[in-house]
Image (spheres, rainbow, N blue to C red):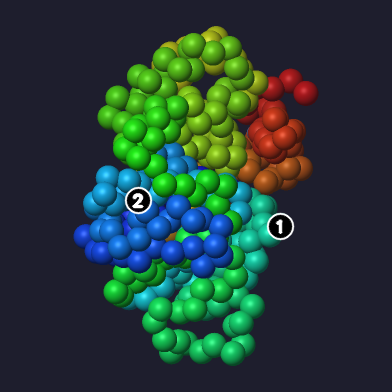
Amino acid sequence: MPEGHSVHRIAAQFRRHFVGKRVAVTSPQGRFGDCVQLDGHTVTEAYAVGKHLFVVFDSGDALHVHLGIYGAWDFAGDVALDDTAASAGGRMGQTAGRGTVVGAHEESLASIGAPRRTRLRMGESDSDRDDSAEFPPEPVGQVRVRILASDAVADLRGPTVCEVLTPNGVERVQHELGPDPLVDKSGEQRFVDRCRATGTPIGRALMNQKIVAGIGNVYRAEMLFRARLSPFAVTKSLPEETLRELWRDWVKLLKIGVTTGQMLTMDGMSAGQKRAALANRDDRHWVYRRAGDPCRVCETPIVMEMMESRKLYFCPQCQGVST
Ligand SMILES: [Zn+2]
């Protein structure tokens, strides 16, 4: 599932190419009839809070999107793509399994950073399209919503949430969300307060979007290892300073994620190690998806356990978990 950094990058892509432009908003797939409320309006703002994207229009209404596990945006036209987005053919969000969004899991993130063609994803009709395709391209597959400006187009597929919200509706959604470091200046205190108000294990709290917005399975595992914290430690019992340090680490990792497009969680890498980490997910993480492999610090095999039906990875030795 795309974590917070991806959604901030998608918002930036909208700011770059759609804000200030009048757009046509359609639902090629036909399952988002409400899109007519946005059609013909000008995009005034785009931003993310955690994993939620808000694209605001001059009517005051906003498009609210949560990608969930399978959702992705495809950008095409006269759009700037950095290496990460280009390597995924203009796709942002769930970038695995080109041409299909079914059956894609976070396990498929391995394909991020792999060399790919740099043109728009064409999916099934790949073979009969060429790189000089006309603009705008025909929507391919199940496009829930298409946002079309004169020179850029964004297609959304497979989201969990795609709806039109009034300003009140936007406020309601955001009120439910925990702090996002890139949005909330006072986020640290809110995070600490919300943690201390619950008796949940920290491994669960970090995934609770009401406590902190934007952290998913990869960042959760990596942050807890970096802090040498047991995922099972109960938030209430943790020293306040430990919680503050966790928040500050999230701020730092999120910024790296937004900049690079990748969930780099290892510090102090040489230039060569960094290149390897960018190219290959196996070289990128402390514990995530490394079950059975030796801990990079103490060589104890990394353990995987299910927590709320999500895979949780940790080093029992470094993180002080008795197994
Ligand atoms: Zn270890």
Element class at badge 2: strand
Image quadrant in which you'd find residue 77? bottom left
Residue 58 to residue 135: above or below: above
- The amino acid type, in three-letter code, at marker 1 is Gly
Residue nearer the viewer, 67 or 5: 67
Q: Where is residue 247 in the image (x, y as percent from the top left)?
A: 41, 28
Please tell me which residue is depicted at 30% across the width and 25% down the height of the picture: 186
Task: Give the mark nearer the N terminus: 2 vs 1.
Answer: 2
The image position of residue 309, as x and y in percent, is 72, 35
Residue at 55%, 77% in the rendered image: 122
Amino acid of disc 2: Val
Q: Is residue 198 left or right of residue 54?
A: right
Residue underneath mark 2: 55
Instruction: Please state the horizontal and vertical placement of residue 40, each as a whole percent of the image.
Output: 30, 63
Above or below for 191 versus 122: above
| Mark pair 2, 1: CA separation | 28 Å
Q: Quadrant of the C terminus?
A: top right
Q: Any mark on residue 176, and which?
A: none
> How dense is the environment of label 2, judged by Cα within 10 Å: few (below 14), some, or many (20 and up)?
many
**What residue is shown with label 1?**
103
Q: Residue at x 42, y 15 (%)?
A: 193
Q: Nearer the viewer, mark 2 or mark 1?
A: 2
Q: Which picture quadrant has residue 317?
A: top right
Which residue occupies the extreme left position in the image?
20
Say left or right for 167 vs 133. Answer: left
Left or right for 40, reference 318: left
Residue 60 percent coordinates (x, y): 27, 45
